[in-house]
Amino acid sequence: MHGSTGSGMDAESFFSLLYDPIQGKFLDPLGIYGTLRKKRIVERDIDTLLGYEVALLIARYGFQIEPTERVPSIESVPLDTQTQRDLLSLVLTGKHTASGLQFLFHAGYFHRYWPELGGLKDVSHSKEYHPEGDVWDHTTETFMYRKNQDLSISLALLLHDVGKPHAQTIEGRKFDKHAEIGTRIASQFLHRLEFTEPLVTKVLFLVRNHMMPGALKTLPIYRVEKVLESDWFPELLEVYRCDLSSTFRGPGGYYEACKIYRAFLRNKKNPFRTVEGKKIQRIREPFVVHTRRH
């Protein structure tokens, strides 16, 4: 993110601490440090902070907004592509991503800048499988189960169900082919924000295959061998773990997928077994008796 933008930052700003290089410490002439330690954004701070600054304080530092009827407004000047990308990346790699995303959503950032994700709130889930709420609630819930703040995994979690608003119900499947649909939408989204091509390729792999680990127990290995061989499969398992855990169904399916993956890796290295674990029957050459000619 770039520095503060313009007159919105005044004497009561959270960013008014000054660093003294001679003394090697920060100066606090306005007494703002106490507020920083409390990690609270109160009524008087609303006018001194831009909306995206509040989102960063929430997502990266765990700040909370004290009960107030006022919400920091979206900037009057639209954010450029680089600033949007930096904002989203910093929120996604914070320790409190779910809270930061919820703030950005309710402040209108998603509907203004990222409409592909803004529509997730309007899509309901079956309470039997997703008691956590609608598709947006489910998406933000997945971040509560991350083990680290890796950007590629975080982007995949944000985008893994982006195809659901556009999917149809076919033969009892409520969101038929939503992973494939979501991959196309995610590609447009990531390219519009100008993420690097290697990162885009990896995230699209994770989005396209995010449901596959749950189906490993029923799929023949030869059909998914290329996916299992990918260097990104461990990260795909992590995306699946977060996705599954957010539904309150427990991690059983994740552990089963890990077991199948480990077996695949062992069998792949074993010259005497197929990737499915079956013994390879080697044909023995017939024994031939050679006789000398006189």
Image (cartoon, helix red, strand yellow):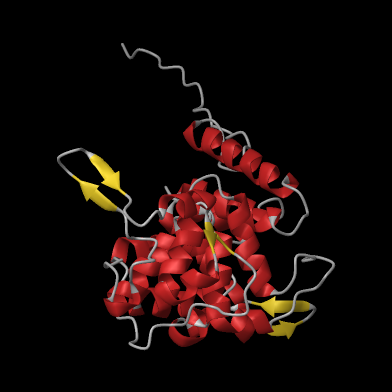
- Residue 118, position as x, y percentages in the image: 55, 82
- Residue 44, position as x, y percentages in the image: 50, 71
User: Could one spot residue 261 in this view of the protein?
Assistant: yes
Q: Report whether 63 appears left or right of 195.
A: right
In the rendered view, tell whether residue 219 sits above or below residue 105: above
Q: Residue at x 28, y 45 (%)?
A: 26
Splitting the image into 4 quarters, where does residue 6 fall? Answer: bottom left
In the rendered view, tell whether residue 135 sits above or below residue 258: below
Judge by depth and name the residue closer to the eye, 279 or 209.
209
User: Could one spot residue 220 in this view of the protein?
Assistant: no
User: Which image quarter is the N terminus in?
Assistant: bottom left
Splitting the image into 4 quarters, where does residue 218 fall? Answer: bottom right
Judge by depth and name the residue closer to the eye, 116 or 86.
86
Disc tally is 0
Q: Residue at x 46, y 53 (%)?
A: 36
Q: Residue at x 52, y 37 (%)?
A: 265
- Residue 168, position as x, y percentages in the image: 68, 85
Q: Report whether 179 appears left or right of 52.
A: right
Q: Residue furthest right?
A: 128
User: Which image quarter is the C terminus in?
Assistant: top left
Q: Report whether 26 appears left or right of 40.
A: left
Splitting the image into 4 quarters, where does residue 248 fall? Answer: bottom right
In the rendered view, tell whether residue 128 sits above or below residue 218: below
Q: Residue at x 48, y 55 (%)?
A: 35
- Residue 196, position as x, y percentages in the image: 29, 65
